[in-house]
Amino acid sequence: NHKAETEICKVKTKWKTQMRELSIPKRVWNYGLVYIAEIQLLIARGREGRPGIEIVSGQTIDISEWLYFEFYNLVWYWDEKKMDMTDEQAPLGRWLGIAHRIGSDMTYWILTKAGRVIARSTVQHVTMSDMAKDTVKQRVAKFNLTVDQHLCDVPSNPDSTIAFYIDDEVDEPERKQFGIVPTDAKYGD
């Protein structure tokens, strides 16, 4: 279990770092942890230099779904009910991961401005040229504020120095003091 606990600690650490750096609301933790764990599953590690899932299944893994977006990217998405696909009609959203077993391949979880999560396959990045337009900047600012209000989180501010603490984590000296982590002598390494 020690190796599994070490991997879980790595996933939690990466999640907390990503939350801080991207000002991600705490309430999307379940999508963020899944995203990080799935990325870890696809990374080639170990002596063989192949992803663990590939070694177990014996099949080459298709990573095409993972190449275009990163967690909490700002995206445009289109509702399948509408035929007009202009940028003015496209709502803003935040990319939360791949919606496995829903819809076709390349269907993604999107966080809407109402704080709801929907699955969509027609998704596109908000590009730097989009962000150069004042109207888009205003839409993004309004979107971020609305999402923060719906998720009851702190306002999105890249300059903020907010620290997140998880109560179940204990500092390393305290872990050894309370016997949570077995001593080196007990493990023999």
Image: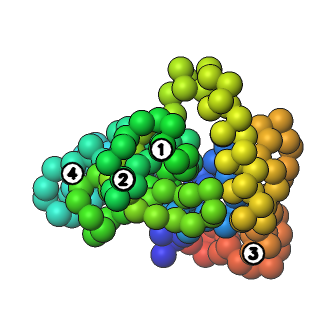
Mark 2 residue crowding within 10 angstroms, few (<14) / some (14–19) / many (20+): few
Q: Could you tell me which secondary element the residue under label 3 belongs to?
A: loop
C-beta proximity under 8 Å, tags 4 and 1? no
> Which amino acid lies under the numbered mark 3 shown in the image of this protein?
Asp
Spatial CA distance of label 4 from label 1 is 32 Å
Query: In the image, which disc is placed on residue 168?
Result: 3
* Gap in angstroms between the C-alphas marked 4 and 3: 35 Å
Work out whether mark 2 precedes mark 3 in sequence or the reverse, and give the earlier one: 2
Calculate the distance from the C-alpha at mark 2 to the C-alpha at mark 1.
10 Å
Return the disc, 3 or 1, that comes first in the chain's sequence.
1
Q: Is residue 108 left or right of residue 57?
A: right
- Per the rendering, the mark at residue 82 is 2
Residue type beneath disc 1? Ala
**Quadrant, the C terminus:** bottom right
Residue identified by numbered label 4? 61
* Residue visible at 36% across and 43% down in the picture: 84
Q: Secondary structure at mark 2?
A: loop
The disc labelled 2 sits on which kind of residue? Lys
Q: Nearer the viewer, residue 128 or 80?
A: 80
Residue extending farthest bottom: 179
Earlier sequence position, callout 2 versus callout 1? 2
Vertical side of 138 occupied by 90: above or below: below
